[in-house]
Image: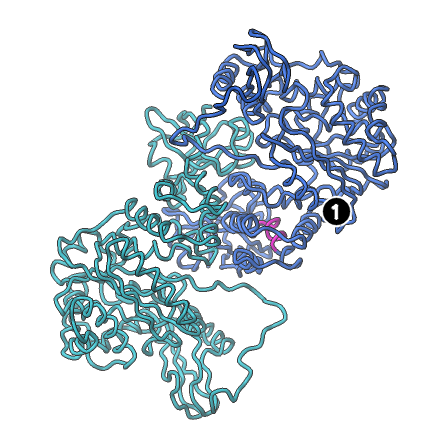
Chain colours: A blue, B cyan
């Protein structure tokens, strides 16, 4: 059928979408979300149809992405016909039915995700099925390979390549900013890519961006690594596993992440990582609640690593409170820098040393954590971080006090004396976000007390930082409501931990594991 | 945040969609598919955000559905803020996790489906979860009630109300056009609503539309029923279970229908049906393959009926070949009319009489099928059908030969002698659709031979009807490829039934059960 083109002048953010009136759709024999083949001169593309009512007849509305491919002008004629249903839909249907998919079937699905041949409905159903039925290790391997094969890779021309990843979930976890320079200072290559916050107050990319630019191209990344043996780049600009970026758009609203392992491992593989330490923060208030769960996840990482030719070690770390004292991009960048300069909290130093140490031991060291600690103590890690900052285009002489944090602050004080019995990670993260993090880099929370600390009535428990008064007020209100830090006389004396209201008021998303 | 409105001038077909640039989205703290609350003067609505790239900044693109609610003009200012996540998302999340939902939770989800507060992703995930985990009878009941409560109902002021439903899947099944006048001729009230074809060559509404208008309003339907005790209306215009119309848009592309029972039963309940016979065509080539499956489905219908205060009887009918000889709206309308006039195929008469007979027996008859047969034989059913046609605005004196069928025809003849060993329902349906049905009413297939019939070389097996040469050619090509009717000397002599190609070329949708 022939249609006159109408350039809608909007972009979908990637998807190739066309719009037709419902009468035309019925004549074409298509429904909303069906695929059509659009032909203009010698160019063909497959697009997803949106069926609209009261749309001009015999008119094909096209999104920017379709224009990019066809280069057709307003009013010109194109031919539209129903496209064959891609093979991958049959495999998605099989997965809904609980069948294990073969590697070439997984590849077909991932390819169609990347080429935008699948609708949101089909992708959502695939992801839901993966979640409900679970994925076999063969499927996980195939998903990982497919994600790598459909993305870009970066070759640093060096070996071995070391890497570090945390599944996240603990606010204030700026460990990467310490681990990377420590490992690089020991002479190893560690080209680290990180994500920005999705649901947290700061991702590593957000934290590092306070110190220097992070959106490097593959070429820039190679050059930084050549100079410094390391980098602290944002992974998002590198197109390493575009399938993952698309799949997460579906996983996020559903708060499920069946693709956690392929998502993480495809990005490691794309940069050629050979030795990887994976941090699994565990405990009440972390994403992984029990050691048992952590061990299962660790086994999966290790097994998948073997299949991909990567050496993986997993660290189960204490995840029941924030790491260090600072939460929020600028506050955390400041704390990380101070810590490398010798004035940081012991838990942060220990965590960084443990993780770097595991990598050192994989490379032959007898006491990796000790080695890592001395590198940090010696100032070599600080020097290396400053090299990286310089190579990425930041100020290598930056001092912690140069880093600007929110000027609107409010201290939350203890109403009774006792010990800090619990800190609610999620509530702390929500308060920091309400104060403006990660968008407002200076916003966040600075703890004064941590688990087990003695508290006198009137002591400052934590301070909320914001860049404007309104957000500060809003964060303070939330803090009063959430009560994220508990002080009591003795463990267990105060028995009522929480009240469950009769009616859930609104649904809050569970954590999504970070990638 | 404030935005200037841009009326996009397109409609989504129901969804309330707004479009924002991705930078604005990030400032709002929303992702694609998140909900936002849009306020203009004293009007608020919840809409689903589409995040676009390269969209004008601080501009809110709005679809027609949003305009309808807000009545805002181009360039006017509206306030946008992230909406609270609806409670129902938590319940969907629970269902993904396999939890049985409580009635008020099901209601919340269905309400948010109807009010368009859920994105395609969320609805797709819900439907996929229902399919994979299955639905308990409590959930099915709750889904049915929720679908009724969120739709319109029609009260005929009469009792008892009888009804008939087929889950479909067998081409040429025009039984309803016989059952409804037969039941009404016996003095019972049977206000039948039917659907149009989704994947088949003709739905009952398509067939009846050849004889008279079918898109009645609730008021018109009441008036037809008052006059004739019956109607043959299209259900789509009545808004009886709007949730179902929305959910099917998700089920269709996935080729799954976990909501079959609520979908069917909600529409029966909405018209106050008290005695219902459900036809379950069964066999190779039907949707339900075995008697065992049919019995399970029947038990579910009956149990659900009890809970809803409806008397259900199920008929498992032979579904291995088309009913009668005609496939396609006009060919079938003609055959149905001829049959009521005494010149029809025996299987069609028997099927209609059995189904009407079950209803008669529910009303106290001792031999319902015999009673139905005599009503048909006496011409009373024909007379009643003509009354219904007249009441709905058609020509009550229509003769079978007045009904125009496609003028482009081609006869397919036997290449060898023997018996008809098999007829492939699905292939026949595809051929009829390729010839133009149901859009072209005169298109379809007319069988000359059915299962077990003796065939001589050169005998006509079936004739393809089309309204234009091109579609006829295309249908003939498909017929040659699909070989939908098998003639062999003796059952079982010809051993090769089908060849499985090494590579599946493209995925074809399995049946969706009709509603």
Depicted A152 relative to depicted A422: above or below = below
> What SS does tag 1 mark?
helix
Magenta span of residues: A109-117
The verdict on residue A114 being magenta is yes
Q: Tell me: A252 left or right of B201.
A: right
Q: Chain of mark 1?
A: A
Q: Residue at x 24, y 57 (%)?
A: B310
Q: Is residue B64 visible?
A: yes
Q: Is residue B113 visible?
A: no
Q: Tell me: A457 left or right of A401.
A: left
The verdict on residue B45 being magenta is no
Looking at the rendered image, the quarter that the C terminus of chain A falls into is top right
- Closer to us: A53 or A376: A376
Quadrant in which residue A455 is drawn: top right
Quadrant in which residue B390 is drawn: bottom left
Instruction: Please name the predominant secondary structure of the magenta segment in the image.
Output: helix
Residue A181 x/y as whole percent: 80, 27
Residue at image mark 1: A305
- Closer to us: A223 or A454: A454
Depicted A1 relative to depicted A300: above or below = below
Residue A232 x/y as whole percent: 74, 30
């Amino acid at each position: 059928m022939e249609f006159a083109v109408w350039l809608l002048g909007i972009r979908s953010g990637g998807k190739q979408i066309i719009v037709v009136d419902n009468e035309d759709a019925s004549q074409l024999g298509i429904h909303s979300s069906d695929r059509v083949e659009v032909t203009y001169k010698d160019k063909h593309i497959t697009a997803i149809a949106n069926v609209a009512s009261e749309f001009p007849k015999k008119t094909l509305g096209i999104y920017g992405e379709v224009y990019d491919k066809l280069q057709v002008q307003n009013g010109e004629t194109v031919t539209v016909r129903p496209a064959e249903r891609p093979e991958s839909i049959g495999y998605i249907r099989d997965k809904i039915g609980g069948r294990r998919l073969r590697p070439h079937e997984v590849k077909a699905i991932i390819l169609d995700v990347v080429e935008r041949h699948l609708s949101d409905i089909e992708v959502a159903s695939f992801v839901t099925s993966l979640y409900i039925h679970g994925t076999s290790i063969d499927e996980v391997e195939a998903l990982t390979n497919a994600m790598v094969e459909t993305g870009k890779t970066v070759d640093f021309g060096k070996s071995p390549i070391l890497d570090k990843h945390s599944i996240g979930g603990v606010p204030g976890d700026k460990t990467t900013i310490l681990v990377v320079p420590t490992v690089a200072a020991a002479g190893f290559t560690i080209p680290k890519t990180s994500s920005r916050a999705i649901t947290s107050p700061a991702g590593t990319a957000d934290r590092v961006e306070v110190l220097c630019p992070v959106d490097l191209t593959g070429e820039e990344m190679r050059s930084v690594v050549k100079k410094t043996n390391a980098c602290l780049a944002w992974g998002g600009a590198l197109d390493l596993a575009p399938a993952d970026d698309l799949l997460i758009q579906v996983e996020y609203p559903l708060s499920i992440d069946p693709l956690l392992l392929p998502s993480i491992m495809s990005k490691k593989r794309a940069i050629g990582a050979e030795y990887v330490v994976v941090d699994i923060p565990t405990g009440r208030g972390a994403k992984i609640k029990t050691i048992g769960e952590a061990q299962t996840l660790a086994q999966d990482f290790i097994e998948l690593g073997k299949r991909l030719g990567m050496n993986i070690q997993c660290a189960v770390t204490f995840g029941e409170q924030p790491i260090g004292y600072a939460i929020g991009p600028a506050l955390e960048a400041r704390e990380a820098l101070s810590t490398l300069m010798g004035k940081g909290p012991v838990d942060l130093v220990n965590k960084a040393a443990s993780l770097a140490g595991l990598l050192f031991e994989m490379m032959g060291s007898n006491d990796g954590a000790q080695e890592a600690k001395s590198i940090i103590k010696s100032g070599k890690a600080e020097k290396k971080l400053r090299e990286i900052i310089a190579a990425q285009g930041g100020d290598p002489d930056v001092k912690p006090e140069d880093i600007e944090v929110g000027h609107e602050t409010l201290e939350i004080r203890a109403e009774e004396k006792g010990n800090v019995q619990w800190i609610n990670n999620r509530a702390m993260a929500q308060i920091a976000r309400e104060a403006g993090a990660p968008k407002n880099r200076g916003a966040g929370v600075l703890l004064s007390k941590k688990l087990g600390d003695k508290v006198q009535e009137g002591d400052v428990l934590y301070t909320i930082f914001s860049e404007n008064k309104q957000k500060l007020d809003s964060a303070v209100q939330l803090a009063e409501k959430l009560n994220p830090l508990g002080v009591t006389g003795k463990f267990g004396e105060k028995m009522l931990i929480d009240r469950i209201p009769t009616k859930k008021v609104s649904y809050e998303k569970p954590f999504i594991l970070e990638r």
